[in-house]
Image: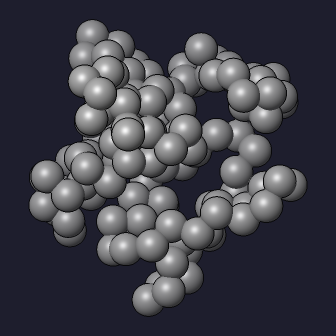
Amino acid sequence: MSAAERGEPAGPLPAAQDAAEALVGFKSHLRPTVVPGDAAYLVSRRGVTALGGSGAEVLVPLLDGTRTAGAVRQEAARTLGAEEADAALRSLADAGLIRSTTPAAEDAAEAYWDLAGLDGGV
């Protein structure tokens, strides 16, 4: 059962008041790759995670850590529609694949804490 199904906040998406400055992207140890028509893949030293569906192909390039969650939703909604874009983003958050961060956080420190299972960006 996902956090959303339990009525809990989903994943590391920033709260509404923090959304203006918090950027959202994949955890630092994940390297995203999109193979059009096949899947999107998240590669790390621990293995490869395949993300299927059109939502993944649209969202993966947007989750580069340079956009807020609202900006990602807005850009993805142009292709997917608002509901599908939001559902796909929430699914990635529920799976623990993305996190929010501030621009000042150091990359190496983020990667360390992400691999340790903690949110390195906050």
Please state the horizontal and vertical placement of residue 28, each as a whole percent of the image. 70, 40
> Of all residues shown, which one is farthest toward the top?
17
Horizontal and vertical percent for residue 39?
Answer: 51, 78
Percent across and percent down for residue 54 are 33, 74
From the viewer's perspective, tell me whether residue 41 is left or right of residue 16: right
Quick check: 77 left or right of 61? left
The quarter of the image holding the N terminus is top left
Q: Is residue 83 above or below residue 66?
A: below
Q: Which one is in front, 7 or 89? A: 7
Left or right of 91 in this view: 82: left
Rendering quarter of residue 109:
top right
Q: Quadrant of residue 5?
A: top left
Colour style of the rendered protein structure? one colour
Q: Residue at x 25, y 17 (%)?
A: 16
Q: Is residue 73 visible?
A: yes
In the displayed orientation, state which residue is furthest to the front.
1
How many marks are shown on the rendered structure? 0
Residue in view at x 44 percent, y 39 percent:
93
Can you see residue 25?
A: no
